[in-house]
Amino acid sequence: MIRLHDTYAREKRPFTPADPERVTVYVCGPTVYNRAHIGNARPAVVFDVLTRLLGHVYGADKVVYARNVTDVDDKIIEAARSEGVDPSVITRRYEDFYLADMGALGVRPPDIAPKATETVAEMVDMIARLIGSGNAYEADGHVLFNVPSDPGYGALGRRDREAMIAGARVEVASYKKDPADFVLWKPSPEGTIGWDSPWGRGRPGWHIECSAMIERHLGTTIDIHGGGLDLIFPHHENELAQSRCAHDGAPLARYWVHNGFLSMAGSEKMSKSLGNVVRVDELLDQGHKGETLRFALLSAHYRQPLEWSDALIAQSKATLDRWYRGYERFVLDYDAHDYAPHPSVLEALGDDLNTPAAMSALGVGLRAASVDRGEVFKIDQETGQWFAAAHLVGLLSSSPQAWFQGEGDSRIDGLVAARTEAKKRRDFAEADRIRAELAGEGILLEDSPTGTTWRRA
């Protein structure tokens, strides 16, 4: 059984999809105008694990996971203007970067990746319906959602009216009937990306795109809507309101799931606007493996804050090194699909995606599986379950050789062979010299009755 904390209900609830044959998940994806930082990667990794778990429980072909791409936005327009290129050049570039960065972290692509620019017709249709129902109005070339027309507004974030008006990203404008009203459509001046509509040439507001995408690709009410904690208000609150009013009161999602903030050690939330970001590609360029970064992101419960630091990365790498050292003692003649993930890991993940508990169980299980069993041994049923559980959360995704040696190095192989020959000649001074030379390069040698292996520290 899976239990998830539902932000709307403010409690952990048993997860029951409306249709077990089609489990629907939607997560707010990137606005593609810049490189992703490690905070942007947290929801991508968290919901990757959740959809993997759902796929295991209900069947991978029964889960439909959509993650949108916001490819029309003021920041995109400004970036395109500064480079003198079409906005599509900016969005294509940074979407490709985003997919590459998330792929390096082991994040699988979603089943559907709708783009805002490809969903304008659906947005225009939904806005027209909202005007027709009295929930939206035209003013000064804009169309705005009339917040007082929705009595349920504010139920997700549970903010009082004054807090909502004073909240971040709420624009105050003279053409609004109410200060809390938000933009569904806004005019685009000549030379700026835009589309024809019943209200003149313009472009959609931020919030309407997700509601229209969900309606088009997943239906009126989905099972899970996810995203970062910072999106609860105003983005998800506004999504919920406009979708509910466009669908005669039907809820947008049955469960709302939000991950906590990521911060730099000793500072506040990581964000581009605060300038305290560490980009994923920068971390990879520094030599950190994507799996190490993934482990670090999963080391805290997804709902809790996560403090990012060099110490966290080092600790994550050290743990994975131990796991891979145990892993390399097995004869790897198996397929993870031949085994079900270990029940203790499934139990932890089923308890509101408790990845720290899952990884703690994995550490204990993998350590127990690799001791007092000789030098090299085949995988038995329980050990196969531990490895399958690691693969379920996207860990131990590499071979031990690739983990420790990367693509290999013929020069290092040659030095290891020369050391072996020196030992055979009983020239231990030369053997020690080669070991010291390699150690100075961060290469560690491990001798065993079956030979010498090397790995990068």
Image (spheres, grey):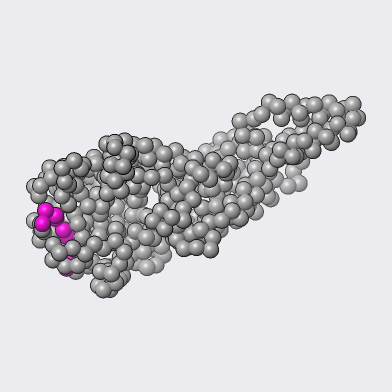
Question: For residue 108: magenta?
Answer: no
Q: Is residue 395 visible?
A: no
Up/down of 153 relative to 375, above or below: below
| Residue located at (31% from left, 64% from top) | 168
Residue 149, position in %: x, y? 15, 66
Is 435 situated above or below 315? above
Front residue of 167/407: it is 167
Corner quadrant of residue 454: top right
The residue lying toward the viewer, choosing from 454 and 190, is 190
- What is the quadrant of residue 252 in the picture? bottom left
Q: Position of residue 389 (x, y in %)?
A: 55, 47
Q: Quadrant of the C terminus?
A: top right
Q: Which residue is nearer to you in this view: 430 or 246?
A: 430
- Residue 213 in the image, given as x and y percentages of width and height: 25, 47
In the rendered image, which quarter contains the N terminus? bottom left
Which residue is pictured at 33% across the width and 61% down the height? 232
Residues drawn in magenta:
140-150
For residue 295, side relative to residue 372 (left or right): left
Left/right of residue 421 with respect to residue 176 in the rendered view: right
Q: How many marks?
A: 0
Extreme-right residue of the structure: 426
Q: Position of residue 291 (x, y in %)?
A: 55, 44
Tell me what residue is drawn at x 13 percent, y 62 percent. Answer: 175
Can residue 171 be seen? yes
Q: Is residue 147 magenta?
A: yes
- Up-down: is 109 above or below 354? above
Q: Tell me what residue is drawn at x 39 percent, y 60 percent.
A: 229
